[in-house]
Image (cartoon, rainbow, N blue to C red):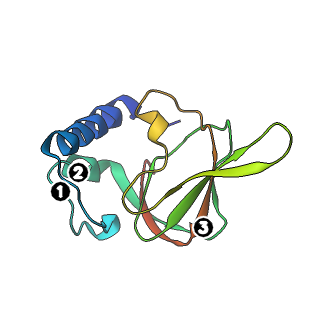
Amino acid sequence: MVRSTSVLAYILLDAVSMELSTGRQEGRRCHSSNKGVTQTEAPLLPHLTPVSLGMGETLYEMEGSIRHVYFPDSSVVSLVTHMDEGTSVEAGLIGSEGMVGLSVVMGDDVSQNHAVVQIADGAMRTGR
């Protein structure tokens, strides 16, 4: 479980609302080197640790606990939903423009999808 969930949630919500209110759309980020970090993202940096994500690595199991929130650099994470009849469907892709574990911002630390790395690279993640 993300221990500083409430603090991070408020920082993330503030950053998102600032981006939406200014209508600013940023391009690709390099989180691990802090290049291109905006003023609204800077408060997150002390809470983040650089990590390497391997191809096929599972970040969360469906209905599993979200222990970390990830901000991919050039890596891409696939969100997969497993259906009751045994089939699976890719529900989304998250790259350098987003974050994996968004439901934590809404106060839910249970993953609704299976999050698996499709393109390996680095990322920043909450916690140690």
- Label 2 is placed on what type of residue? Glu
SS for dot 2: loop
* Residue located at (67% from left, 35% from top): 63
Q: CA distance from mark 1 to mark 3?
A: 27 Å
- Please say if 50 is above or below 98: below
Q: Which residue is mark 3?
A: 118
Q: CA distance from mark 1 to mark 2?
A: 5 Å
User: x, y (%) of residue 55?
Assistant: 62, 70
- Report the amino acid beneath label 1: Thr
Q: Which residue is mark 1?
A: 38
Marks 3 and 2: which is nearer the front? 3
Please name whichever residue, 94 or 35, is drawn nearer the observer in this view of the structure.
Answer: 94
**Residue drawn at (45%, 41%), measured in percent from left and top?**
102
Residue 41, disc:
2
User: Relative to 83, is 106 above or below?
Assistant: above
**Spot occupied by residue 96 in the image (x, y as percentages of width and height):** 39, 63
Which residue occupies the extreme right position in the image? 85
Of callouts 1 and 3, which one flags the residue occurring earlier in the amino acid sequence?
Answer: 1
Residue drawn 30% across the image and 40% down it = 12
Q: Is disc 1 in contact with disc 2, using a CB cutoff of under 8 Å?
A: yes
Q: Which mark is residue 121?
A: none
Circles 3 and 2, Cβ within 8 Å, touching? The answer is: no
User: Which element type, helix, strand or loop, lies under badge 1?
Assistant: loop
